[in-house]
Image (tube, rainbow, N blue to C red):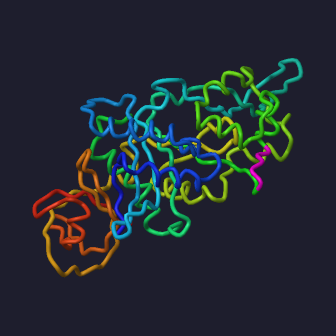
Amino acid sequence: MLVLRPIEQTDLPQLQQLARDSLLGVTSLPDDSERLQEKIDASVASFASAAAAHGPESYCFVLEDLDSQRLRGCSEILATAGHDEPFYSLRNRHFTSASRELNIEHGVPALSLCHDLNDHTLLRGFHIDAALVRTPFSELLSRARLLFIAAHAPRFAEAVITEIVGYSDESGHSPFWDALGKHFFDLPYAEAERLCGLQSRRFLAELMPQYPIYVPMLPPAAQECIGRVHPDGQEAFDILEREGFETNSYIDLFDAGPTLYARTANIRSIAHSQIACVQQQTHIDARRRFLLSNDALQGFRAIVAELDYQPDQPLPLSPAMCAALNVVNGSPIRLIAL
């Protein structure tokens, strides 16, 4: 059985292996033991905190195979983007110029460096074992974070965002980076992303142009990258789009990948998840697949299971399901259909 749980100190070696296998552009998963240890420390402290409002907390989750004790994926929530340093993006909006004499009005799309998305909750660090791509466990790894937000709403903002990795080719070249960022840093795209993972994007963002970049002046290949999802990032995009997230006018600073946005209260797994009480029993008449979680903090657990759920009735769970979720008869369970 696969279960999603908070990361622990003993997970460092396996987390670093996940980082090595992750998609280029997932800068929150650097292949560096010191930075990953800092991530684990911050997450453990966040789960242990008594936070009553969203602040600097970060919550890192891992997907563990209970039989082999192998980690098969990871994902993260940053309670407040831009809490410790500005969260930089590129805003993609039209600039309109007009001439009364000629009776001409013309709009030109332009990219402007900004940190408009500060103070939003940020989903990041999504990575899953290649063998589990496009299985229910991808849904578990992504959406269980939303059930955690539902259970601990005061810890998170009124809106949630995520950056989806933008296009780069098989050799790691990004046409957008080559057309824009590379002119300000003599670095290939992969190296710029690596430095962001090891340090922060702030030092790179501060050297980016402070004036609007007119999109038509970029090469066609770079323009085509704006809002384009990397093929390996499409599943992460699709899952959250089904949750009600939408693209907006913001893109990633380096690869122009899209930013997704949703009001927290409108996210499907938050708005429509239900609470039921556990009734442990040996035989389960499985009729539909559900995402289940307890509402604990440090002891948070989530699984995928096939159940026969009837609203306003006890929820039948097998002993193995109860053990995976750390629940007993009468415990509350949050669930939503897959």
- Residue at point 80% right, 45% down? 175
- Residue at point 27% right, 37% down? 48
Residue 26 x %, y %? 59, 46
Comparing 60 with 259, the one in front is 60
Q: Is residue 226 visible?
A: yes
- Residue at point 50% right, 68% down? 132
Residue 289 x %, y %? 35, 72
Q: Quadrant of the N terminus?
A: bottom left
Relative to 206, residue 218 above or below:
below
Residue 269 x %, y %? 36, 54
Relative to 190, residue 328 above or below:
below
Predominant SS of the magenta segment: loop
Is residue 135 rendered to the left or right of residue 94? Answer: left
Comparing 71 with 95, the one in front is 71
Residue 263 x %, y %? 43, 41
Name the outermost residue toward the top: 101
Is residue 172 located in the magenta-colored stretch of the structure?
yes
Comparing 281 with 186, the one in front is 186
Q: In which quarter of the image is the C terminus?
A: bottom left
Name the outermost residue toward the right: 102
Is residue 291 located in the magenta-colored stretch of the structure?
no
Comparing 239 with 61, the one in front is 61
Relative to 70, residue 62 above or below:
above
Q: Can residue 158 be seen in this view?
A: no
Magenta region: 171-175
Which quarter of the figure has residue 203?
top right
Which quarter of the figure has residue 60?
top left
